[in-house]
Structure formats: structure tokens, C-alpha cells
Amino acid sequence: MINMLTEVVVFCPLPPKPNGIADYFAEQLPYFSRKTKVTVVIENTHPEPVGIAANIRILRLEEYMWQQGYYSSIPHIYHVGNNPDTKYMLPVLLAKPGLVVVHDLNLHYLIDLTNLSIGDKEGYQLALANNYGEAGETIGKQLAEFGWKGRFMPHELMMNNSIITAAERILVHSKYSADKIGALGHSNVCVVPHHFSPAARQYQPKLKMQYRGQLGLPGNKPVITSMGFIAKAKQIKSVLKALSTIKKQGIDFTYVLAGQCKPHEYDVYQDIADSGLTENVVVTGFLDEDAFFKYMLASDFIINLRYPTGGESSGTLTRAMGMGLCCVVVNIGPFGEVPNDCAIKLEWNEDFDHNLCAQLKRLIEDKVYRVTIGKNAQKWVERTHNISATTDAYLNEASKLIDKTKFNSRALNVNVHEYLPLETISNWERTSKVNEDYNNLWWRANLIPLNHERVLSVAESQEYQVYILRELFGYAQKDILEVPIDQIALSTRGQLNTLAVIDASLSDIAVSPMNWLMGINAVLALGGKLILSFLVPEDLLSEYSLSRASLKKMLAAAGFSVDKTIAGPQDISMFTDECPRSERWVFSSIKRSWMVNVNPPVYDNGASELQWLYNQNERKSGA
């Protein structure tokens, strides 16, 4: 049952933008507007939208910002794809919680557009560190110092953490994407299939030969088609190789590449020539919707290969299957979720080229085979990809959004911390009862930010630490979550913390510090502030070969960036010459990444944690 919304704000490009997401949402808009008032926000330089009903309010980003106060209490939906057309919405998305529709799990190019593509190498390095911790920082340094940017990076490093973390709820089109996002710790993820286009119903399979005549395609031989941008990941080179082999066997055909070329990424014409298929291949360039559907239905079957996959679900595939066409896909990611009897699903292994060639030959020669698979696909799409049902699912998810009129404190790099004036701390210290037997270095250094919703407090002297948080920094008792030091990893209680103040002894972490710091990483939100104090007895320091520099490296390996380090004696007496034998180390840091390097070489002797434990055991057994 849908909780009805009176109004919703949607950030998404619209036609005539040559963008699949724009077409996708334009098809949904009539169904949205029947049930709620819709405002669509587009970028400032967006061309004038076409084909949009008059009852849909359209604002450019600048107009929305003028009225942000009014719209702040209205549920927001953001359509995010790995392309320039969704870049404009990122500042609002990161600050205003909403329902984020992740069309492409891989958002590397989108993030690249916000920094590296405009010459901001430091921003790109920070994004790498935010997403991949210490490993990302190392890759960023290689880029800055040597200009190294491996070809694997845009495919393997998905760079989606900041957007996923900023979302209150997430909608995806496949279980594959939902599982990947769930693994990052986001629990509010909903799977809604990519809808079948209502516009497709205007075109009839029985008019195949008429469409071929209009498009100049032959009527006396098989027509095979690949739809959409002609990119390297579509494995066009493998298709051309297979078709070249088939042609040498005396089988004739026409292969249509129905989409726009990306010459800077892939020279398809060279591969066509090398394959000896110049007379067999038609490259159409960009197609309008009418030509798109006609090329699709003029075909005998569709080749929709993608490897590697960025987690995207193909609108082209859904349209083709819904129109009763047999499709050939790689059995990976979202494409692997298509039922086995509804498509030709090829495994990506050492036999891929051989199997592709065999299947293409069979599909060309066996009409019953391809028609049977196409009919199975059509029935499946009609049953599961109905646009009315998918639109209802969108509105249902949007209705679950919590009304928030302030900025999202979980959004990475949005946090702007406020602190007490130093004078206030000095005055409070003079007029209050300060217990010098406990740790005071963390608050005297004014490291505690104000006005967080909740503080995770961990300390051996918990009562005294809570007293300071309450009396000096103004946190209410109900907003202070007190947790025993051995239960940090269990402290989330349904939500992540944006501020943690932890006072421990080096003995609490010294045996397995990275494991201990991983527990802290797990309970802090991205961008969360960590104030970490250690009591460091002199004898323990020498026993465990740790130093402040070692711990700073460990924090970096655990996904934190340290912005300040302070050290001081545990106690100072004016009435004795005895030097203190213990001291305090305090680290002020920010969580930058979920990624943790669990075994970095951080000990003073250059050993990793596992190496150090092994050496300790060897030393003890030798004794």
C-alpha cells in the first residue's frame, strides 16, 4: 500500500538531452503526476525540455536554490548516472538527504568530472582516499607524482561511497547492485526493475520488412543489431571476430551498430576493416527514438554484451526483450539475473569467443530457436517490468523518507565543525572542579566540535568524561551514548555516529591495534569526527614498539585522516622533581573511508601486525 505523497522534487535530466536516464524518467513522469505534484530540477544550461506535460513544474538549479527553504521539507529523488548530465545535482544530493536512484553502480567517471577532468588533482586524490582509504591515497600520489592512471581504474574503482553514504534511501534496478551497496553498510536499499517503455507498444514486430525498407536494410538476409553507444566494453571486437568466422563459412548477414561512436575511446571502423566486414556492417550514429525502435524491430536478434560491467541495467535490453527479441548477453552482474530461458547468456571465460561464434551461427540459422527465447523474454518483461508498478514502487520508497530540513550530517565533506572559543575553555577551567587524576588533555586542546546529534563516549573514567561533555561542551545526557571500551563495535544501535570521544590505555589496543581501530571505523559515519586519547605507560611503550608516528599510520590504514596530534604528560607536579613516567597521546581525526588496510607495516621496527605477533610468540617460546 502506497503512502501518498502530496509533492516530490526530482533531480534528473529531461529530453532532448541525449541521455537514457532522461528518456527513462520522461516515460515515468505521466504516472508520477497522476498521484502527486512533481517538480523537476534540471541544470542551468539544460536545453528547453520537450514533450513534458504542462502540469510538471520544471526549475533550473539556480531557481531551485532561490527557493530551497520551501522545498527543503519535500521528499527529494535524485537520478544518478555515470555521465556529465547528472553532475549538476551532486552538491544538493550530498547536503539534502533523499532517495537516490543509482542507475550505474560504477560512478568513477562522474566523480572524475568534479575534479580531475577540470584539473583538480588534489580533489581526485581526496576522492580516491575517501573511497579506498590508504590504498586510494597511494594511487592518488602515483597520479600526482608520475601521472600514472591505470586503465583498470575507471572499471575497477567504482568511486560511489560518498554518494551512497549521503543517501537516506537507495533504489537500484538489480539484486547485484543492491548486494554491492548493502556490503558498504547501507541498509535502506530497494530493488525496482527497469520498466518497459510504453512507447515501444506503438511499433509492431509484424512490420519488420516495412521498417527494413524505411531504413535501407536488406530484406533477404539476417539482420543482427547492437544498440546504444559503441563502446569498448560492449565487446564489439569479439562480435566482429565471430561474424568474420561465420562469413568465411559462406553465411551472409548484416550487422547494425545502432548508436553513437566514441572515437576517443574505441576506433570501431578499424576493427570493422580488419575483420573484413566493411560490406556487412552498418554504423548508424545517434538515433532518435523513432529510428531506435524501428532498427530494433527490423532485427532478427540483438547482441547486448557488456564486460566489464559497471553494475548498470540496460534499458535497451529491457526494451528489446519486451518486444519479443532474443538477446545475447554476458552472464555477469545484472545481466546474470535474466532467467536462463529468456536470453542467450554467455560465460566470460577462456571459451567466450568460441561460444559466442557458435551461438551467433545457431541464432542466424535457427529461427525457431531465437523466436522461442524472444517470446519467453517478452512474457517475463510483461510480468515483472510494468511501468505503473515500478512508478508506484518509486513513490512508496519516497514516502518513507524522513522529513529533514537541515543538511545531512552523514554526507562526506559537508560537515563544518564549530568549536568553543579558547577563552571559554580557559574561563571554565578556572571556575570548575577539574580533576587532575583523570585525562584532561583532549578538552584543554579544544578538539571537541559542538552541536552533533549524538556523542559516542568511551572511557575508563566515563563519569568524568561525560561530565566534561555535558558541562563544558553542552551535550545533553540523552545525546551521550556511553559504551564500555570492549563493546565499541556493538555501539551503533541502528545508526552510525558522527562524533566519538574515546579515552583508552595503550594496553587496550597494543596486542591487535588494527583490529581495534576497525571496530571504531565500523561505528563512525563517513566524515565523522574521532577524538582518540591513549594513556601511554613508559614500560608498555617499550614492550610494544609503538610510537605516535606508528599510531598515526595505523589510523590512516584504518580509514582516518589525522588533522591534529597532541602529546603531554599524564600529570605534572610543582612540588617534586620526579618526572612523570606516563604520558597522553591525543589524535584528532576524520573518517574518510570504509576501506581498511588490515595489516600495514606500521610498527617502529617496520613489521606488520601479524609479523609483530609472530615475532613476539617466537621470542616467548625461545625464552
Image (spheres, rainbow, N blue to C red):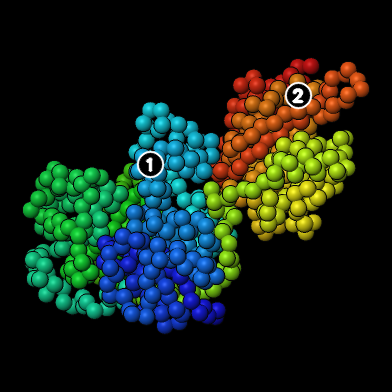
Which amino acid lies under the numbered mark 1 shown in the image of this protein?
Leu
Residue, x 65% and y 27% (percent of image)? Answer: 550
**What secondary structure is found at the residue carrying circle 2?**
helix
Quadrant position of residue 424: top right
The residue tagged 2 is 541
Q: Height in image: 463 above or below 298?
A: above
Which amino acid lies under the numbered mark 2 shown in the image of this protein?
Leu
The answer to which of 236 and 472 lies nearer the viewer is: 472
**Is residue 140 something that shows in the picture?**
yes
* The label number, if any, that marks residue 479 in the structure image: none
Residue, x 65% and y 54% (percent of image)? Answer: 496
Callout 1 crowding tier (Cα within 10 Å): few <14, some 14–19, many ≥20: some
The answer to which of 304 and 24 lies nearer the viewer is: 24
The residue tagged 1 is 116
Residue, x 53% and y 48% (percent of image)? Answer: 413
**What secondary structure is found at the residue carrying circle 1?**
helix
Callout 2 crowding tier (Cα within 10 Å): few <14, some 14–19, many ≥20: some
x and y percentages locating residue 132 in the rendered image:
51, 41
Quarter of the picture holding the C terminus: top right
Q: Depth-wise, is mark 2 or mark 1 nearer the camera?
A: 1
- Count of marks placed on residues: 2
Whether residue 343 sits left or right of residue 287 in the image: it is: right
